[in-house]
Image (tube, rainbow, N blue to C red):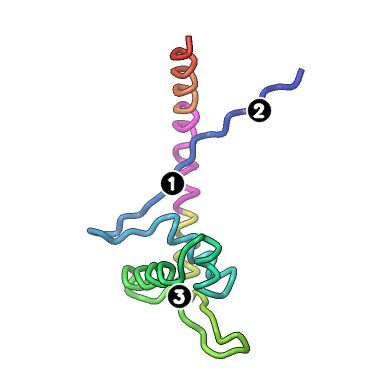
Amino acid sequence: MPKPAATPLPSLSVRIDLDNDDRIGPGKILLLENIREFGSISAAGRAMDMSYKRAWDLVDEINRICRQAAVERQTGGKNGGGAALTPFGISLVARYRKIERDAASAVRKELAALRSDIGKSKKAASR
């Protein structure tokens, strides 16, 4: 008889509060990754069901928060240019993803215990 599929662990979402209202989190990092992949702020925004204005506002916010450019516009080319991550932007994405991996690894046992506790309470409630 096949073994039932294991329930996946709850996931951890990391948001880094730099100060007051300045935050870097999964949405901004995904936008940067999409800019790197697609070479364009508008294409990155479309991939996230986001308007160009919203995507550009987030890029502008990231650049302001970090006090240096994570994204730079590229002019020219047959399609009129695009955007690329700066060396700092590439480093920001890599550092955030490392923090995220390290945090998930550090809490893996607790997430498994949480999943188990929630599973027990669901079974007890259904009785």
Q: Is residue 2 left or right of residue 36?
A: right
Residue 26, image x, y percentages: 44, 55
Could you tell me the amino acid type at mark 3?
Answer: Val
Q: Over which residues does the magenta segment extend?
A: 99-113
Label 3 to label 1, Cα distance in Å? 23 Å
User: Dot 1: few (<14), some (14–19), or many (≥20) neighbours within 10 Å?
Assistant: few
Could you tell me the amino acid type at mark 1?
Answer: Ser
User: Dot 2: few (<14), some (14–19), or many (≥20) neighbours within 10 Å?
Assistant: few
Label 2 to label 3, Cα distance in Å? 42 Å
Residue 82, image x, y percentages: 54, 80
Question: Magenta segment: does it hold 46?
Answer: no
Decide: marks 3, 1 in contact (CB < 8 A)? no
Rendered image: mark on residue 13:
1
Q: Which residue is mark 3?
A: 71
Q: Main secondary structure of the magenta part?
A: helix
Element type at marker 2? loop
Decide: marks 1, 2 in contact (CB < 8 A)? no
Could you tell me the amino acid type at mark 2?
Answer: Ala
The residue furthest top is 127
Q: Is residue 37 left or right of residue 27?
A: right
Q: Which residue is mark 2?
A: 5
Report the residue at 44% width, 28% height from top. Answer: 114
> Between disc 1 and disc 2, whose residue precedes?
2
Report the residue at 52% width, 76% height from top. Answer: 84
Rendered image: mark on residue 35:
none
> Between disc 3 and disc 1, whose residue precedes?
1
